[in-house]
Image (tube, rainbow, N blue to C red):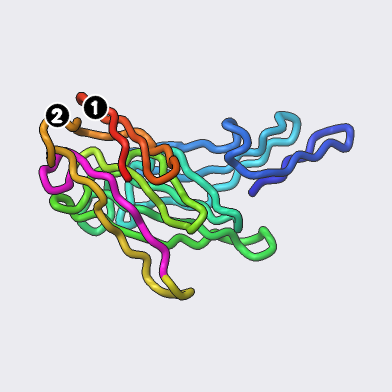
Amino acid sequence: MYTSTAGRNFTFSGQLTAAAKSLTFSRLARFAMILILGTCAAAQTLATIHDFGAGRDGENPQSGVIFDRKGNLYGSAALGGATGNGSIYSLTPPAGGQGPWTESILHQFTGKPDGQTPDSVLTMTQTGNLFGTTQLGGAKNLGSVFAVIPPAAPGGSWSERVLYSFGTVPKDGSGPNMGLLAVTGGLIGVTVDAAARCFS
């Protein structure tokens, strides 16, 4: 969440997703920081809410991020993590808006037959499930569509499931690196090579 105040008693508040200029990724060497920048030029404030450091939790978070209704942030890091194949993370804002954000690693990819290089923005459904794509990995190492599912009870672990591995059928495409569109009964996505597909 952000609040930005400028002259003439003007205050603007809202979700980061409401304004493209409010979120900036700044790469430092191979790693990155997540920055929040207020949208009013007269009173911009900048705060680092997470530094990926040495990439143990993730590296190169080059895709966009999303927020849920509680203000938690979700994103993917294309590289890094325990095996260097990328990760899915969340950041929880501090109570009262002051203090550090809390990072949680929801899934760390392991490569084939799991996914590898998740570099697209995530899609969240009303049930809280996260959907995304990986450029590599999957059964054929041509990319995958995955779901990361929240725990049934608070404090539990998130679980990941590969929904589709590219190369399973002839000419189904490969290397998906775009976000997914959730439609009734399925997902629509685009691959770098060949096809656009609908998953259900």
Q: Amino acid at mark 2?
A: Lys
Asked whether, in this view, residue 1 is left or right of residue 158, the answer is right
Q: Tell me which residue sits at (17%, 51%) in the image.
A: 111
Residues in magenta? 137-151
Circle 2 crowding by C-alpha within 10 Å: few under 14, some 14–19, many from 20: few
Q: Tell me which residue sits at (74%, 35%) in the image.
A: 43
- Label 1–label 2 contact, CB within 8 A: yes
> Which of 68 and 32 lies nearest the eye of the viewer?
68
| Circle nearer the N terminus (1, 2) | 2
Q: Which circle marks residue 78 in the picture?
A: none
Q: Quadrant of the C terminus?
A: top left
The residue carrying mark 2 is: 171
Under tag 1, what secondary structure? loop
Asked whether, in this view, residue 87 is left or right of residue 44, the answer is left
* 39 lies above or below 106: above
The residue carrying mark 1 is: 195
Residue 30: x and y in percent read 31, 40
Residue 62: x and y in percent read 38, 37
Question: Taking the image as drawn, is residue 28 in sight?
Answer: no
> Which of 171 and 36 lies nearest the eye of the viewer?
171
Q: Amino acid at mark 1?
A: Ala
